Amino acid sequence: MKKIIAAIFAVALSLICGHADNTKAAAKKPINLLFIMTDQQRWDAMSCYGNTVIKTPNFDKLASEGARFASFYSACPVCTPARTAILTGHSIESNHVLSNNDADKTDAPPFPSFDQILLHNGYQGEYHGKYHSPYRLATDYTKPVRWLNGKVPPPGCKADISESEAFFQFVRDNATQPPIKPDQLPAKTGNYIPIPLDENYGKKPSGKPSQAEMYGRLVMSPAFSHTAFTAKEGIAALERLKDKPFTLTISIDPPHPPMVVSEPYYSLYPPEKIPVPTSINDFRTNSPYGPKFRAGEDIYRNPGNIQQMRSIYYGMVTEVDDWIGKILKRLDELGLAENTLVIFTSDHGEMLGDHGMHSKMVFYEGSAHVPLLMRLPGVILANTVVRTPASQIDMFATILDYLGQANHPSEGQSLRPFIEGKEARKDRFVVSEWPSSSVPGFMVFDGRWKLMFGRTKTATSLDALYDLKNDPEEVNNFIGKNPEHEKYRAEAERMKGLLVEWLTRVQSPSLESVKARSVVREAKADDKN
């Protein structure tokens, strides 16, 4: 099987190499690509998406100068599958990349990335920051791409050190840090002072805390933060790439945990002024993610804890926003802004106390709904808002369309017609996936209704149907354990039909089992809720 996949991949690349630029352009200069992404940034963590607390002037400016997508969804609400879907334009099952563990695969995905297509068609390119996909997609860049963690590089990697070690070296060479005090703990980003929400608050310093449970004030100048490190490397890359057509990715790790940030960002948003999500009191009794979905989540039902958590998270996003401003300013100074497609997005979101939850890996809005901003002066009209549902698997076709490399196979669709107002399909929907049977394996959203549905006929997961128009907080599941679920059978069947349509199109191995699953299953005693 590995040999077959490798052969498919090789054939795909050979076709790419022979593919001539099919639009020699009306523009005098070829279009560059500046692709900026963060990790774990939910869609509403920007003021241009309606958040009245956080201040993000540079994201807002980018949105006002181009297009903002109101309904953009992760292909899978966890890092590696989502990032790989963005790169290849294929679903996680088609990519054979279903979890973060698959970042180490050497025989998948069987498709090239949009960057590999560009790099084989006259572009030079670099990738800086968090690389969290199978490394076979990273081998064609002009400068070697660092692997994420660990001492042993993946096959084909020519980088001398990992991304994490490069950051540690940057801190050691540049930052002067105070010694660790009894109330400080070592984090992967430096020393920090934990807050009560932190799992090690009040305990002796530990060398191996869980980054997902780390919250506090980073004891370090923001000039030496992880965000600053990646952004500075991206700006330096612009200098190297400026004289030829280029593709550049700047992949910033925050606001992914550990949720630690330096002053002035730590104190920028007083916790007591941050609203608590109304769904914090949803005890998920009729939810696919029942009351015991994650052990120890009671601390995320405490309003004070969530206010502190959001305060730090918003500070991290604002730090990213500041560096986005510096990156875009340098792009402008180099005379590149007019012919560079700038894209900003994230791989998945963060619950931030919604439904009394934290982290990702669920289909609720906080986890699956992500931002997408696009700017290309003279091509994408300013102040464009696209409300048509869109997915990460659409990015591949969209990027190649704008850069004159259209018609490469993918399971997505170019979003250009929606951006240009040439197509406004009311029947369009998106799908997100999760490889599990104890919780829903699929989510389908049509702009109003959201169905969370089991992966197989016999999966123990509880299914859910939400009306986001009238219930944007997703607290009223019309099926599952709802005694009136029969009233909503027709709507649930319609949404299931959309899912089946999509599974058929991507030739999913789950198709027949999903077709056989009832939309109004009676909850069983062994349902894992």
Image (spheres, helix red, strand yellow):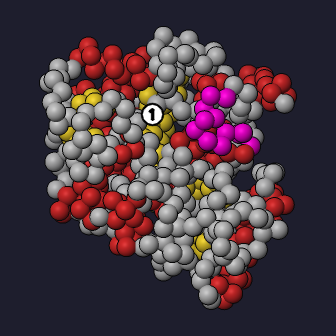
The answer to whether residue 99 is magenta is yes
Residue 24 seen in this snapshot: no
Q: Secondary structure at mark 1?
A: strand
Which three-letter amino acid code belongs to the residue tagged 1?
A: Ser
The percent coordinates of residue 176 (x first, y second) are: 17, 20
Q: Is residue 7 left or right of residue 322?
A: right
Residue 378 sits above or below residue 4 on the image: below
Which residue: 41% across, 49% down? 41
The percent coordinates of residue 294 (x first, y second) are: 48, 57
The answer to whether residue 15 is magenta is no
- Asked which quadrant contains residue 121, the reply is top right
Residue 464 sits above or below residue 318 on the image: below
Residue 488 seen in this snapshot: yes
- Asked which quadrant contains residue 515, the reply is bottom right
The percent coordinates of residue 119 (x first, y second) are: 62, 23
The stretch in magenta equals: 94-105
Which residue: 23% across, 30% down? 191
Instruction: Locate the N terminus by quadrant.
Output: top right
Q: How many marks?
A: 1
Q: Is residue 234 left or right of residue 174?
A: right
Instruction: Locate the C terminus by quadrant.
Output: bottom right
Which residue: 51% across, 75% down? 285
Q: Is residue 84 left or right of residue 268?
A: right
- Asked which quadrant contains residue 279, the reply is bottom left
Q: Is residue 86 left or right of residue 351?
A: right
Q: Which residue is mark 1?
A: 251
The percent coordinates of residue 397 (x first, y second) are: 65, 43
Residue 497 sits above or below residue 84 on the image: below
Which residue: 15% across, 30% down? 181
Q: Residues within 10 Å of mark 1 (few under 14, many from 20)?
A: many
